[in-house]
Amino acid sequence: MRTVFDPTDPGSHAYGLLTSIVVPRPIAWISTLDADGVGNLAPHSFFTVVSAHPAMVSFTSVGRKDTVRNVVATGHFVVNLVTEDLAELANASSAPFAPEVDEAQTLGVRLEPSAVVPVPRVADSPASIECTLHSTLALGDAHLVVGEVRAITVDDATLVDGLPTIEALRPVSRLGRDEWGHSPEVFRLQRPRRP
């Protein structure tokens, strides 16, 4: 037996159902600057790769939050990887700070200049993706933001044969409710070749 939920019914808790079922979700801890140079740092778990050639990533903001306003105003953002050591700070940065408050400065998150874009990255994050705005799309109560990747920076200590390992990165993920996920247990499967 199954319970059937109608996502158009306000009592169905569609957001809670979707975020509890579409798991685990990688976290884009996005740093931006507003038009006056005030910083913003916020986690977004509706995040993925869009294209490899050209390299593009996307994130979705439910509501038009500071992150989206800043990206539209300046055309730049940085996706910072959230590790187990950074999870509590990333969670704290999700609080509803006023637009004029710099979350990184308030919470003591160390920032450093990015390699290419004029937005700082999180210094203690082992990997960052520096982007310029490609496009935005309003979808229901959310805003989809697509960014063209201008640079990917990775801590050398995490690289093996030119690629970072999951064991070295130790990323966390978002699950449902107030649940977060530790780095996953890894198993490997070779991709099948065409018969």
Image (tube, rainbow, N blue to C red):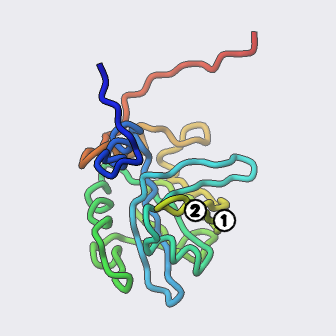
Q: Is residue 115 left or right of residue 22?
A: right
SS state under label 1: strand
Residue located 65% across and 59% down the image = 149
Residue 32's spot in the image, x, y percent? 49, 73
Q: On the rendered structure, is 3 left or right of 149?
A: left
Q: Nearer the viewer, residue 95 or 125?
A: 95
Return the residue found at the far top: 195
Which disc, if any, is residue 145?
A: 2
Disc 2 residue type? Val
Above or below for 44 versus 12: below
Mark 1, residue position: 135
How far separated are the C-alphas under marks 1 and 2? 6 Å
Dot 2: element: strand
Out of 140 and 125, give the one closest to the viewer: 140
Occupied quadrant, residue 109: bottom left
x 31%, y 24%: residue? 2
Residue drawn 68% across the image and 65% down it: 134
- Outermost residue toward the bottom in this view: 36
Circles 1 and 2: CB distance less than 8 Å?
A: yes
Is 54 rendered above or below residue 41? above
Instruction: Locate residue 181 relative to residue 136 in the image: left or right.
Output: left
Indicate the quadrant containing the C terminus: top left, top right, bottom left or bottom right.
Answer: top right
